[in-house]
Amino acid sequence: MGNYFRNIYQAVRTILIGLGITLKYCFARTITVQYPDVAPVLQPRFRGFHYYEIEKCIACDQCARICPIDCIYIDKSAPRKLDKQSGLATGGVMVRYAIDYNKCLFCGLCIGVCPTKCIHMGDLHDLSGYSRAGMTVEFADLAERGLRAPEPLWMTKKRLPQWAQQRKEQWLKQGEGREEVMLQAVRGDGAEAREAEQTG
Ligand code: SF4
Ligand code: SF4
């Protein structure tokens, strides 16, 4: 009997605590963030659009396999493996590494399983497109341009607020100094072609 009343007490108490929190926010001061003129405040563990280091990717498919909604697409020309000395993946080229952001849940599971730690949750919070197809980001194509993360539409504007201009500069610098190895990951260093010539 005591248990019965204890359960009722617990249920009423938790409902009142929940309602109390709601009530507190009902009377809290409303704050309007003047985005995009003012930068949004992102928490340190914010999970934004991915940031991808293609030159370290061994195309093992582990991220694609763990993805709960199958929105990662990977294609390679031949197996790749990590060269421990250089920290770069060698072997075939990355034909495709794409993520469909129409479906992505930003759960971060793909990050946790990556054996070479080459895929990360980035800090870009906004990505828009004119079509559904435009929301599938082709990271191998971006790598050819020396980029590691997708380009939000606002970045293509000529005049940007100061905070956005700074973020654009950071975004452009992500692959700085690594352009050659990134390009090698998508185009190869010619070793495959030489091998085919010798065997063919
Ligand atoms: S964040 Fe989650 S849903 Fe998005 S690609 Fe990674 S595993 Fe898939
Ligand atoms: S991103 Fe990581 S887990 Fe995904 S294929 Fe590349 S190495 Fe494997």
Image (tube, rainbow, N blue to C red):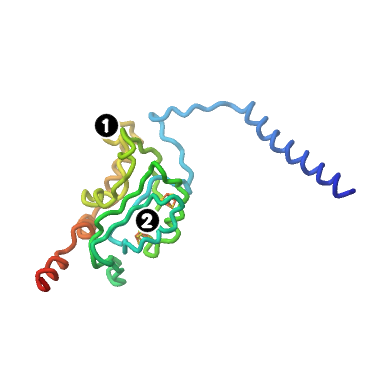
Q: CA distance from mark 2 to mark 1?
A: 28 Å
In the figure, 38 relative to 78: above or below?
Answer: above
- Residue 157 badge: 1
In the figure, 104 relative to 182: above or below?
Answer: above
Classify residue 36 by image quadrant: top left
Tally of numbered discs: 2
* The C terminus: image quadrant: bottom left
Assess disc 2: are there few (<14), some (14-19) or many (≥20) residues with their C-alpha within 10 Å of its C-alpha.
many
| Residue to which mark 2 is pinned | 119
- Residue 168 badge: none
Whether residues under marks 2 and 1 lie with C-beta atoms below 8 angstroms apart, the answer is no
For label 2, being within 8 Å of ligand 2 is answered: yes
**Disc 2 or disc 1, which is closer to the eye?**
2
Secondary structure beneath dot 2 equals: strand
The structure residue drawn at horizontal position 28% and vertical position 67%, both measured from the top left corner, is 79
Assess disc 1: are there few (<14), some (14-19) or many (≥20) residues with their C-alpha within 10 Å of its C-alpha.
few
**Left or right: 154, with 62 as reference point:** left
Observer-nearest residue: 20 or 166? Answer: 20
